């Protein structure tokens, strides 16, 4: 149950929560009054909350509102947010995805989130003319102290900063986002696989040349891609996403034999019969083709 405070204009602000549920919903209205704000620290360090859905009526989220909520995996936001405080999701180490609806092309809240160096997350975008999925790696802000010169020199580590800079308040530069991929691929396999999967599954404004680049990378790193899909499932228990991702990889012929064997073993452990059937079907089709040759 959510706790509210009433503002001078008669609107409500979320001030806390009692007995939090796994799927927490911030409603548009409560007792006939619109809900406009989530106050500072009001939802911080909540255990057991796995998702938060925030209504379009909410325009402000205060500093550290959801700070260090250890079980938070998924958040739903929209472009109606006009004020987003510092560190809203800082310390939410389990966070996997942010659903962001922006039919009018307002990315203010997303941009505000991306100025934080962590956490890394997958952003599932609802746009006026389609859907996109972008993964934003984390980065580190470091400082080197030059004691002789009495100067501090800022230093940024990690490829995440370059990807995040592709988002402004009013636009997303998909061309520049895709250009950063070589840097990610040279650095770490995990973020590179997540970036490639998102861009290929939802190829919004994706050029053919970049599409082939992503496909080539995933074909070479299909074991990593499969491992990540099952690791995410272990945390989120999102069966639908796991099945959809692995089915897509199989049908796009982006699973090596080793990756397929790993996926079949893990699907059996998780008792995912429909996924096992899909993977076996693909293997049978490939064996049949090989025999005919």
Image (spheres, rainbow, N blue to C red):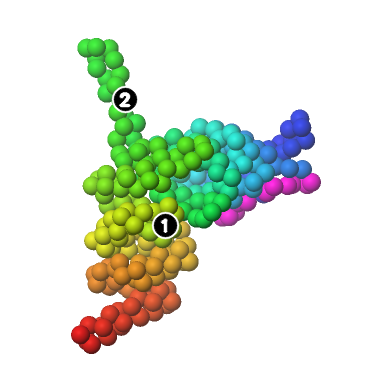
Is residue 88 at least partly visible in the picture?
A: no
Q: Is residue 210 left or right of residue 17?
A: left
Q: Residue furthest bottom?
A: 292
Q: Is residue 257 above or below residue 88?
A: below
Vertical position of residue 65 compared to residue 283: above or below: above
Q: Does residue 210 belong to the magenta stretch?
A: no
How far, Cα to Cα, is label 2 from label 1? 35 Å
Write the residue at 31% across / 25% down: 154
Is 25 magenta? The answer is yes
Q: Position of residue 204 (x, y in %)?
A: 44, 54
In primary-sequence order, the first of circles 2 and 1 is 2
Furthest toward the top, the residue is 149
Q: Residue 171, how many percent across, how many down?
A: 49, 41
Disc 2: CA contacts within 10 A as few (<14), some (14-19) or many (>=20): few
Q: Is residue 49 above or below residue 60?
A: below
202 over 70 or under it: above or below: below
- Secondary structure, mark 2, is strand
The mark found on residue 203 in the picture is 1
Residue pointed to by mark 2:
154
Residue range of the region highlighted in magenta in the rendering = 19-32
Counting from the top left corner in percent of width and height, residue 127 is at 54, 51
Residue pushed farthest front? 208
């Amino acid at each position: 149950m959510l706790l509210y405070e009433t503002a001078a204009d008669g609107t409500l602000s979320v001030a806390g929560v009692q007995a939090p549920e796994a799927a927490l919903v911030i409603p548009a209205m409560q007792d006939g009054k619109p809900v406009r704000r989530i106050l500072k620290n009001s939802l911080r360090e909540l255990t057991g909350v796995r998702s938060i859905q925030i209504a379009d009526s909410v325009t402000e989220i205060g500093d550290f509102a959801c700070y260090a909520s250890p079980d938070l995996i998924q958040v739903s936001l929209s472009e109606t947010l006009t004020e987003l405080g510092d560190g809203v999701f800082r310390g939410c180490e389990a966070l996997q995805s942010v659903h962001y609806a922006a039919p009018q092309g307002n990315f203010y809240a997303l941009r505000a989130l991306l100025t934080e160096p962590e956490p890394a997350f997958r952003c599932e975008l609802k746009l006026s003319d389609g859907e996109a999925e972008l993964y934003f790696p984390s980065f580190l802000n470091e400082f080197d102290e030059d004691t002789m010169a009495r100067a501090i020199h800022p230093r940024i580590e990690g490829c995440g900063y370059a990807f995040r800079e592709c988002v402004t308040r009013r636009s997303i530069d998909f061309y520049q986002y895709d250009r950063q991929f070589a840097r990610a691929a040279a650095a770490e396999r995990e973020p590179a696989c997540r970036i490639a999967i998102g861009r290929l599954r939802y190829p919004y404004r994706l050029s053919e040349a970049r599409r082939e680049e992503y496909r080539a990378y995933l074909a070479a790193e299909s074991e990593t891609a499969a491992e990540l899909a099952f690791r995410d499932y272990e945390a989120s228990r999102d069966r639908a996403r796991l099945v959809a991702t692995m089915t897509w990889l199989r049908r796009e012929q982006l699973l090596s034999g080793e990756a397929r064997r790993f996926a079949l073993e893990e699907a059996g452990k998780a008792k995912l019969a429909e996924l096992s059937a899909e993977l076996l079907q693909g293997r049978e089709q490939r064996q049949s083709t090989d025999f005919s040759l």
